[in-house]
Amino acid sequence: MTNSKTATAAVPTLDPADIFTKAYNFEQADDLRNAGLFPYFQPLGGQIGNEVNVNGNRMVMVCSNDYLGLSQDRRVQQAGIPALEEFGTSCTGSRFLNGTLSLHEGLERDLAKYLNKEDALTFSTGFLGSLGVLSALVGRREIMYFDRENHASLYDGARLSWGELRKFRHGDLEHLEFLLKKDADKAVGKLIVTDGVFSMSGEVADLPGIIELARKYGARVLVDDAHSTGVMGPNGRGTAEHFGVEDEVDLIIGTFSKAFASVGGFLAGPADVVDYVKCMARPFIFTAALPPAQVASTHESLRILSSEPDHRERLWKRVALFREGLSALGFDTMKSEGPIVPVLIGDFDHALGFWKQVWDHGVFALPAVPPAVPPGECLIRMAVNASHTREEIDRVLAVFAEVGRATRMIP
Ligand SMILES: Cc1ncc(COP(=O)(O)O)c(C=O)c1O
């Protein structure tokens, strides 16, 4: 048995009895690194506004999820300090045991009020929220209907649950109805699960259509509003508010790592369901609670995004400017409507080549490749935020124009 990747680099080991064999033989990332084409895990050396320092180079950031620009808001930054001083750096325990603070409960109360739901529960990340809600709620023989392009955390939540998974083609409600109809005579719990805004393409789910089918076939509806809470709808209450169907969505899950400029996840819905998840979800119970400073900053973000609509107004003006600019140049921005603006490239090699040129021009945007997107549909995933200046947007558009012409993506 060999014991290091370096030792095996020249002669890959084939020892099937060594669990490390797959790691020793994993070369795709190294091949790309050696070719200077590995886009991921780029260390940022600091950030001022939307400019980041990467290896001494100043780059304009256009792929963060800080949609309202609140990560740089002094009020959000300062809000963490008294909590840190009063409660310490960590809860050093689970919410179930010593880790429930008055801060958590205060945030949950105000979040539920904001989202017009009976109750809310916070998780240590949005990913854990997806795992916790689906694994606690979906029992043996119960059925989840998933849009095929749902987020990875939902798929992993489905795997942790005891229920059955049915996938419908992305955005294809005829296919969803076909699946529901096939199960119509099964008297078991059914849950339709969809991203509100899809995390790679920025497309918005057809919630009114999904709700209609849910009512017709007796299913509940869960929306993952990670990319919608704080930004979609007149008051930022998410995809359901955007469509005017808030009362008809049973459960909303989401994250604090995007518009809230913090970290953490949440569930909002009927009090009995929230309490059941609170008492049953292993990814909630067997992990440390959100740290005090993070909860306090999140709460301040909630206060700001629920009471200061101008951040959203600025966001949407910039998104429109950016998306229209890219379309006018001849790029395919897919069916994006939310704050995420993709540029469709196509195959893997082209996506990396395109990314590299954009990167070398000082634009921090990254490619999305399988499994995050379907094969052959690689894209450059971008998002502008409320604090991008017109100059920054014009600079990025100029780079896309130049690289697009050089690579013959656009005329
Ligand atoms: C749709 C969706 N759900 C859940 C998550 C997980 O959120 P978190 O970063 O809080 O773990 C993400 C994050 O990328 C997401 O895009």
Image (tube, grey):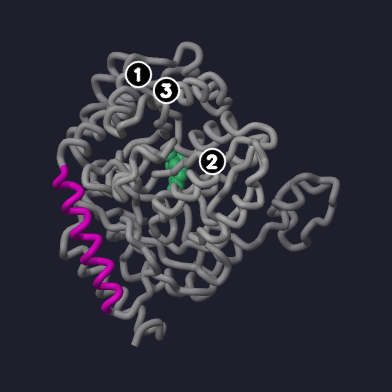
Look at the image and say whether residue 317 sits in the magenta stretch.
Answer: yes
Q: Does the magenta-highlighted stretch encompass residue 348?
A: no
| 173, above or below 283, in the image | below
Q: Position of residue 315 (x, y in %)?
A: 21, 54
Q: Count residues near mark 3 (Cα–Cα under 10 Å), then give few for <14, some for 14-19, many for 20+.
A: some
Q: Which image quarter is the C terminus in?
A: bottom left
Mark 2 or mark 1, which has the lower sequence index? 1
Which residue was labeled with disc 1? Answer: 105
| Amino acid beneath label 1 | Glu
The prevailing secondary structure element of the residues shown in magenta is helix
Number of the label disc, if any, that sits on residue 271: 3
Region of the chain picked out in magenta, as a range: 309-328
The image position of residue 349, as x and y in percent, is 54, 74
Circle 1 Cα neighbour tier, 10 Å, few/some/many (<14 / 14–19 / ≥20): some
Is the CB of mark 2 within 8 Å of ligand 1? no
Q: Residue at x 48, y 48 (%)?
A: 194
**Earlier-in-chain disc, 3 versus 2:** 2
Mark 3 vs mark 1, CA separation in Å: 14 Å
For numbered disc 1, what is the local secondary structure?
helix
Secondary structure beneath label 2: loop
Tag 3: amino acid: Ala
Mark 2 to mark 1 CA distance (whole Å): 33 Å
Q: Say left or right for 21 vs 77.
A: right
Disc 2: which residue: 218
Residue 393 vertical position relative to residue 95 in the rendered view, above or below:
below
Q: Quarter containing ligand 1?
A: top left
The answer for how far apart the CA atoms under marks 3 and 2 are is 20 Å
Visible in this render: residue 364? no
Percent position of residue 229, x then y: 32, 42
Instruction: Tell me whether circle 2 and circle 1 mark residues in contact (CB < 8 Å).
Output: no
- Residue 42 place in picture, x, y as percent: 43, 54
Mark 3 or mark 2, whichever is nearer to me: 2
